[in-house]
Amino acid sequence: MPQTYYRKATLDHFARQTLNLYDPQLLLGEPTATPIDRIIEFDYGIRIEYVYLRANGNELGKMIYDDGFAGIFNPETQEYEITSVSSGTMLIDEQLLPPASPGRLRFTQAHELAHWILHKDFFTDSYIAAAAYKFDNNIKSGMEWQANYFASELLMPSVQVKKAYYNSNTTQPGKIFSLANIFNVSYQAMSICLNATAL
């Protein structure tokens, strides 16, 4: 199946639509953190399960598109195990749970939700996890860029970031920390967002 290319404007529209479906005040009210876990579970009916995905920790999230099986790492036995998984399950690596920074966990959740919304048709009935799918690197990097951009717009809607930015009385480094706290994202994610946003 050919992969659809989504323009930024289309991704912006999908992100606004997702936020508006849950609560229009996320776009119209006072800037606040997006309740990403509730959107995932209640609006999309996706189950979030926390497991260890890889021994080396280099895979933080995985969307399950078909009923089947997935390999997960058991830190007690230091071995991989096969477990049954259901379509509509989001696997998130346990290393992202507290005391780790919530920003990384929330971005991973938003990134995996983006894959579900944008790329579900591509992977459904393939019985292959997105991370294991063998396809052209340009397509893979395009999908990852789309998921990252969509996740950023879900967690840091540009209209709300601009509102919070201009309402903040602190200096530039302080603004980044302040906005990162408001939207409950990492300092790095907010820095990237502000660099990409026309202020």
Image (cartoon, rainbow, N blue to C red):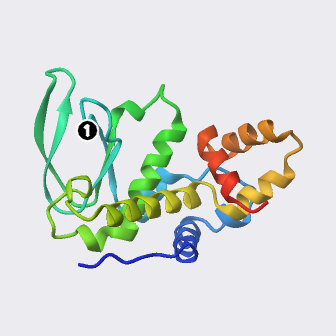
Relative to 146, residue 83 above or below:
above
On screen, residue 111 versus residue 59, left or right, reads right
The residue nearer to you, when weighing 141 against 36, is 141
Whether residue 96 is visible here, answered yes or no, is yes
Q: Residue at x 75, y 63 (%)?
A: 198
Q: Specify few, some or many for label 1: CA neighbours under 10 Å numbering under 14, 14-19, or 20 or more.
A: many
On screen, residue 97 versus residue 183, left or right, reads left
Q: Looking at the image, which residue sits at the far top?
A: 76
Q: Residue at x 51, y 76 (%)?
A: 7
Relative to 57, residue 39 above or below:
below
Where on the picture, by quarter, is residue 55?
A: top left
Percent position of residue 103, x then y: 54, 40
Q: Residue at x 72, y 54 (%)?
A: 31
Q: Amino acid at mark 1?
A: Leu
Q: Which residue is mark 1?
A: 53
Whether residue 41 is visible here, answered yes or no, is no
